[in-house]
Amino acid sequence: MPTPTKGARLGGSPAHQRLILANMATQLFAHDRITTTEAKAKRLRPYAERLVSFAKRGDLASRRRVMRSIGDKGVVHRLFTEIAPDMAERPGGYTRITKIAPRKGDNAPMVVIELVREAYSAKQSTVKEAEAATQRAAKDEQAAPAATEAQKVDEA
Amino acid sequence: MAVPKRKMSRANTRSRRANWKATPVALQACPSCGANKQAHMACPSCGTYNGRHYGAAERTEHQA
């Protein structure tokens, strides 16, 4: 769950922020990559990633939940049929923010936020950690039956 | 409300403001094109970051 935002809303009012985030998420899922200010991208990231999580679940209820925020049915279809399968293996982190040079007019820090649609490959350190955990679990399982057998002998 | 008792001299004002200094932006060579770029930011001359290309990052003719 995204942490609730503190402080001022984007655009001034909660309703305006809802519209801004919904529109930006729609454009992100339609084009895969949008250019925006850093502040907006940082707010958009948890919002869009939550929608991707719903799309990965893929059932009717989650589709209706996504339809609440994205009005465009074509974009929702693209999210569920094209984007969600690409994210199937990925454990979160569906978007990537890359900083670009500040905007000319007001020097606002600009970024490109994009969907990470490359094939997922786990980091080598994560793989090693997971393998160690399974080995430990296997060892514990081997030790556990012996202990229960000993208990049974005592009871008899 | 507290107010200054004396006018502040031009010299005092200027010597205070003399310490308002801008620091130069730290730049480094872009690994793909060699032009100067800021760290953690897509290169404005070739648009690459971490091996990925971003067209929106490239410098337009209005920015120079």
Image (cartoon, rainbow, N blue to C red):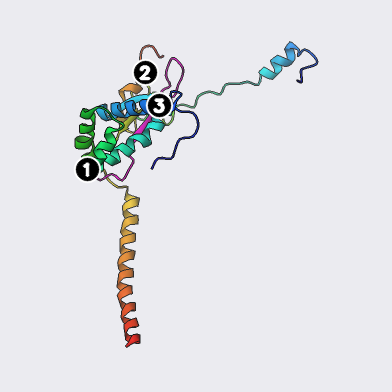
Residue A144 location, quadrant: bottom left
- Which dot, 2 or 3, sits closer to the camera? 3
Q: What type of secondary structure mainly makes up the magenta span?
A: loop
- Residue A101 x/y as whole percent: 41, 23
Q: What residue is rendered at 33% in x and 39% in y?
A: A50
- At label 3, which amino acid type do we have? Ala
Q: Quadrant of the C terminus of chain B?
A: top left
Amino acid type, label 2: Arg
Q: Chain of mark 3?
A: A
Q: Position of residue A139 (x, y in %)?
A: 32, 69
Residue A42, image quadrant: top left
Are callouts 1 and 3 both on one chain?
yes
Spatial separation of the CA atoms under disc 1 and disc 3: 28 Å
Q: Which residues are magenta?
A: A87-110
Q: Amino acid at mark 1?
A: Asp
Q: Is residue B17 visible?
A: yes
The residue tagged with tag 1: helix, strand or loop?
A: loop
Looking at this view, is A117 or A5 the one in front? Answer: A5
Crowding at dot 1, Cα within 10 Å, few <14 / some 14-19 / many 20+, comes out as few
State which chain disc 2 sits on.
B
Q: Which residue is mark 3?
A: A15
Distance between mark 2 and mark 1 Cα atoms = 44 Å
Mark 1, residue position? A59
